[in-house]
Image: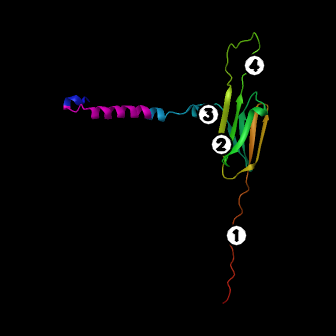
Amino acid sequence: MDLRLFGLETPLIHTIHQMMDTTDEADKSFNAPTRTYVRDAKAMASTPADIKEYPNSYVFIIDMPGLKSGDIKVQVEDDNVLLISGERKRDEEKEGAKYVRMERRVGKFMRKFVLPENANTDTISAVCQDGVLTVTVEKLPPPEPKKPKTIEVKIA
């Protein structure tokens, strides 16, 4: 809307309009995701996993072709978040060889899983065999039902 038609073209009105325009730009840049967030989101999206529940455990299965056990980290954060991360590196190029096509993913990978309350984080095991990582989280035994407490009544 052109404010000059109403005789409202003053320095104050002009300044207010400029402030409103720059606020929109500041909001856009302030709400933009950080590079770390984008990198972590890509790493998580490119690391698919299968999760199985057994009567006594949870099993996480993740394909890790070509990785050695030293390239994979399995950790527990905040007492109930299972974090699986690592990095897949490109093979060193030999002299005279060049890539015609590069389709295999390289770089960091990561997955986070919030563990259920009955997960025993003290007995987690991880095995990487034939390019498949299997992480087993044992379940805690169910709590025993509380028995009623009998209170002796004394005669005064």
Quadrant including the C terminus: bottom right
Secondary element type, mark 2: strand
First of labels 3, 1 by sequence position: 3
55 inside magenta stretch: no
Q: In the rendered structure, find residue 128 and report the number of the disc placed on it.
A: none
The location of residue 8, given as percent across then percent down, is 22, 33
Is residue 11 rendered to the left or right of residue 77? Answer: left
Query: Which mark is nearer the camera, 1 or 2?
Result: 2
User: Furthest-front residue in view?
Assistant: 11
CA distance for labels 2 and 3: 14 Å
Q: Earlier in the sequence, mark 2 or mark 4?
A: 4
User: What residue is at 73 percent from the left and 54 percent from the top?
Assistant: 140
The residues colored magenta run: 6-26
Which residue does the numbered mark 1 point to in the structure image?
Answer: 147
Labelled disc at residue 92: 4
Residue 26 higher or lower than 102, as above or below? below
Picture mark count: 4
| Whether label 1 touches label 4, CB < 8 Å | no
Q: Earlier in the sequence, mark 1 or mark 2?
A: 2
Quadrant where the N terminus sits is top left
Dot 1 or dot 4: first in sequence order is: 4
Q: Mark 1, residues whose alpha carbon is within 10 Å: few (<14), some, or many (≥20)?
A: few
Which is closer to the viewer, label 2 or label 4?
4
Residue at the top extreme, as displayed = 96
